[in-house]
Amino acid sequence: MTALPKANRRVRQARWACALAFSMLGGTTAASLAVTRLPAQKAAAIQPAPLPANRIAVSANSIRDAYAKGQIDRPIQSILNVPTRMQYGDFRWDDKGVPAGATWIRVDLKSQMLSIFRGGHEIGTAVILYGADSVPTPTGKFPILAKLKDHRSATYDAPMPFTLRLTADGVSIHASNVRWGYATHGCIGVPDAFAAKLFNAARVGDEVLIVS
């Protein structure tokens, strides 16, 4: 691995949602905005169920803003409530109560965060490593091409467990020693334990959106 330039060698205190200017507005969602226009008896019947304490609802205004900025390409209903600053090597995973649904992954290079969503709800998030300036991580939309549990890189002669391959030339998400001052050769590195969970949750063909 290669040391990152000093300007990039920090984990931002704000989670990726804050980077998107997600204003929570008291947990206002698209559904709750709609019911304010209905008679009280009808509104009471379709009020969304309150979210558990480990989740934060994402407002309709925040979703529109994120779409406009190209930061997401599908709606999000909630993110995990992570009240403390995340450090290198940290991750959170909590899919309790989240229904079955389409899975996709979002990587924010600026905030150095990866999030996995299922059915519109964030179920995991982690601090990442990304490509050094000489070998930058590409941005855009990528389907997962292959899953390789015990992969070893022939190019770098290095283990890359729980690989989710994104490009034909080898850019992948994989387990790494995520710590300050380190970078990758263009891949996205995540903590080992998180990589195992991500590997089990993701499927070939799932979309990975990488934004900067």
Image (spheres, helix red, strand yellow):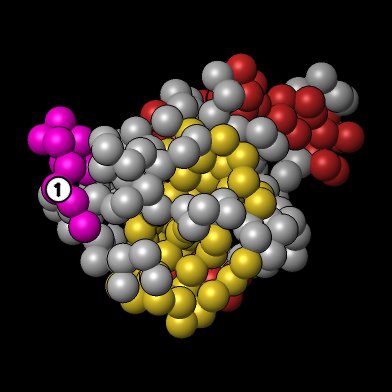
Q: Which residues are magenta?
A: 1-12
Residue at figure coordinates x 45%, y 77% from the top left: 151
Residue 11, x across and y down, in percent: 22, 43
Magenta stretch holds residue 9: yes
Q: Nearer the viewer, residue 196 or 118?
A: 196
Residue at figure coordinates x 63%, y 58% from the top left: 144
Give the position of the C terminus as an image quadrant.
top left
Which of the 4 image quadrants contains residue 68? top right
Give the position of the N terminus as an image quadrant.
bottom left
Which of the 4 image quadrants contains residue 135? top left
In the image, taking residue 162 as reference, residue 201 lies left or right, namely: right
Residue 62, x across and y down, in percent: 56, 25
Residue 114, x across and y down, in percent: 44, 50
Magenta stretch holds residue 152: no
Residue at figure coordinates x 82%, y 34% from the top left: 43
Q: Which residue is mark 1?
A: 3
Figure disc tally: 1
Q: Name the amino acid type tagged 1.
A: Ala
Residue at figure coordinates x 48%, y 69% from the top left: 163
Furthest residue to the front?
A: 155
* Dominant secondary structure (helix, strand or loop) of the stretch shown in magenta: loop
